[in-house]
Amino acid sequence: GDSVTQMEGPVTLSEEAFLTINCTYTATGYPSLFWYVQYPGEGLQLLLKATKADDKGSNKGFEATYRKETTSFHLEKGSVQVSDSAVYFCALLRYNAGNMLTFGGGTRLMVKP
Amino acid sequence: GAVVSQHPSWVICKSGTSVKIECRSLDFQATTMFWYRQFPKQSLMLMATSNEGSKATYEQGVEKDKFLINHASLTLSTLTVTSAHPEDSSFYICSASPVLGEQYFGPGTRLTVT
């Protein structure tokens, strides 16, 4: 079945450091890929998405490129801020699978000033 | 746009009582709504999928008689936790889907059963 694997956290960085959170997936066909962010005590917010191979999703300085050859969708940001501290979830969706999202385990990011 | 609300945001109830959680899409119609459960520091676990006007589809291991889901309109779905017990304490999150491939999440409801 479908699965998403993320690097385990927590990831602790200093402000302005470079961020990479790894995400790899297993799925048949051509899923859409997503990154969601969850701030403490809140629900999930869509951060960015990519719907086909080589697409790059970007938002708020975050980027991720859909790499079908490596089945990866790594999240990057060039310079993190304290306000980026949150839990990040990678997810995939296959349109012929009932519109259901499959989530990775989540990666907690802590940014220190 | 694409705002989903949940009510209440936080509820405490006594063991044995029932609690209803509402999920509303405020500015769009959602043919499908999803209910998730999230334990502390863990990922989201899909509990059920509901389509307006039809019975919900529950994931394996989720008790349908305990977690009653109603999707009475295109903007409202409710989750009722019946005869709640302390092990039901969790963070419940809904999402609403206006079209295939899009899901918008509510802010979540924290349930504590004493």
Image: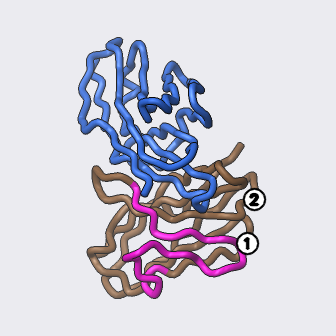
Chain colours: A blue, B brown
For the C terminus of chain B, which image quadrant? bottom left
**Label 1 chain ID:** B
Magenta highlight on residue B97: no
Compared to A72, does B52 lie above or below? below
Seen at 28% across and 50% down, the residue is B41
Seen at 52% across and 30% down, the residue is A66
**Gap between marks 2 and 1 measured at Cα:** 9 Å
- Circle 2 is placed at which residue position? B29
Tell me where the magenta segment starts and ends, as one range: B44-67
The picture quadrant where one finds residue A1 is: bottom left
For disc 2, the neighbor class at 10 Å (few under 14, some 14 to 19, many from 20) is: some
Q: Which mark is residue B73?
A: 1
Pick the front one: A39 or A63: A63
For the N terminus of chain B, which image quadrant? top right
Seen at 36% across and 39% down, the residue is A87
Pick the front one: A23 or A45: A23
- Helix, strand or loop for disc 2: loop
- Helix, strand or loop for disc 1: strand
Q: Amino acid at mark 1?
A: Ser
Q: Amino acid at mark 2?
A: Gln
Seen at 41% across and 82% down, the residue is B63
Location of residue B17 in the rendering, given as x and y in whole percent from the top left corner: 39, 85
Same-chain status of marks 2 and 1: yes
